[in-house]
Image (tube, rainbow, N blue to C red):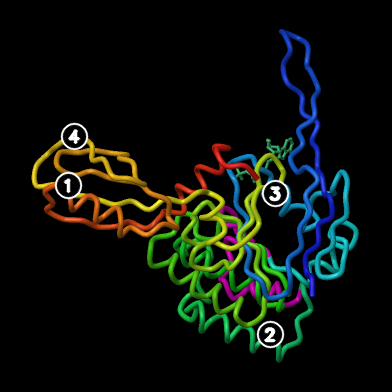
Amino acid sequence: MELIELDRVSRTFTVRSKAGRLRRRRHEVRAVDGLSFTVRAGECVGYIGPNGAGKSTTIKMLTGILVPSAGRLRVAGVDPARERVALARRIGVVFGQRTTLWWDLPLRDSYELARRLYRIEPARYAANLERCVELLQLGDLLDTPVRQLSLGQRMRGDLGAALLHDPQVLYLDEPTIGLDVLSKARVREFLREVNAAGTTVLLTTHDLTDIEQLCGRVMVIDHGRLVFDGDLAGLHAAGRSERTLVVDLARPGPPIEAPGARVVKVAGARQWLAFPAEQSAAPIVAAVADRYPLQDLSVREPVIEDVIARMYAGAVGG
Ligand SMILES: Nc1ncnc2c1ncn2[C@@H]1O[C@H](COP(=O)(O)OP(=O)(O)OP(=O)(O)O)[C@@H](O)[C@H]1O
């Protein structure tokens, strides 16, 4: 079942810029440009792109905050901008940089407000609260005013608040931003469980480890258009991923010459040789070992950051 459907959705903004001392020029910014995709129930999809690519504009349209300038949009069977109340019952939203919790109230009171707002039945509320408290380790925090929580604790509180009404879709905007390693791991573990239990997740992040650990599918957007939609292996292939052979020579020497690989860095006796990720390292290792005095060798796997950086830089077509 398709839970999110976008059919040639666009959103333009009219902005004014200075054109001389007094004059202002109006021009249009096309933040989202004829975007089409669908997300099936149960998927966990990473939605990534460089700054200004149109991610937030898409999420705002999906939550009904912004109306599309053109195209058709459906989330869990409703038109987000036209049926915001019906939509609110079906979605949960977490913004890493903002909180939906009441700053001066204990976490428990924010949850109680959510219960009333969404008219959650008592038995369901009790069960969901218990599950969130257990999975997010909120027990000791429920009676603490939100302003006294650490960022990691507050984020866990926000995740709980977004899920008390059993939404079908969860939108996450930078859910691990600013968190330490342990808090990030906790949040990711929780999201994995939420997704495994059936909630559809759309995740926007600049932390690509979130994507690697959570998302079976990734969409890359740039200039308001989809430039990639597929799995991580496909992303590596599309980004022409490279592995790196790190060679420690017995002594410093000129750049190594090995068929199928090129030297990308030299530091003293250490040299880095890049080669296509899908190719075997064996012939290159054999050629290097045959011709050069070796101390040590290791192979580094491609780093997703590099793949994405190449895509953002426009080095890779569609
Ligand atoms: N309210 C607005 N008025 C005018 N222009 C806007 C508005 N909101 C967004 N834009 C423009 O639309 C484009 C897309 O912005 P958007 O915030 O969707 O990008 P983003 O991918 O979320 O970026 P980031 O990673 O920095 O959050 C940008 O050029 C931005 O300046």
Q: As rendered, which of 112 and 6 lies closer to the eye?
A: 6
Amino acid type, residue under disc 4 in the picture: Pro
Amino acid type, residue under disc 1 in the picture: Arg
Q: As rendered, which of 283 and 233 lies closer to the eye?
A: 283
Kindly state the secondary structure of the residue where label 1 is placed.
helix
Q: Earlier in the sequence, mark 2 or mark 3?
A: 2
Up the image or down, 276 lies above or below 109; here it is above
The reply to whether callout 2 and callout 3 are in contact (CB within 8 Å) is: no
Q: Earlier in the sequence, mark 4 or mark 3?
A: 3
Q: Earlier in the sequence, mark 4 or mark 1?
A: 4
User: Which residue in the rendered view is the most extreme toward the bottom?
Assistant: 123
Q: Which mark is residue 254?
A: 4
Q: Nearer the viewer, mark 4 or mark 1?
A: 1
Q: Earlier in the sequence, mark 1 or mark 3?
A: 3
Amino acid type, residue under disc 3 in the picture: Leu
**Horizontal and vertical percent for residue 244?**
33, 51
Q: Nearer the viewer, mark 4 or mark 3?
A: 4
Q: Which residue is mark 3?
A: 226
Q: Which residue is mark 2?
A: 125
Distance, label 4 to label 3, CA atoms, is 43 Å
Q: As rendered, which of 11 and 156 lies closer to the eye?
A: 11
The reply to whether callout 4 and callout 1 are in contact (CB within 8 Å) is: no
Residue 271 appears left or right of 225: left
Query: At x 69% / y 68%, what residue is drawn?
Result: 92
Q: Which residue is mark 1?
A: 291
Kindly state the secondary structure of the residue where label 4 is placed.
loop
| Chain part drawn in magenta | 93-116
Q: Nearer the viewer, mark 1 or mark 3?
A: 1
Where on the picture, by quarter, is residue 116?
Answer: bottom right
Distance, label 2 to label 4, CA atoms, is 68 Å
**Horizontal and vertical percent for residue 162?**
65, 70
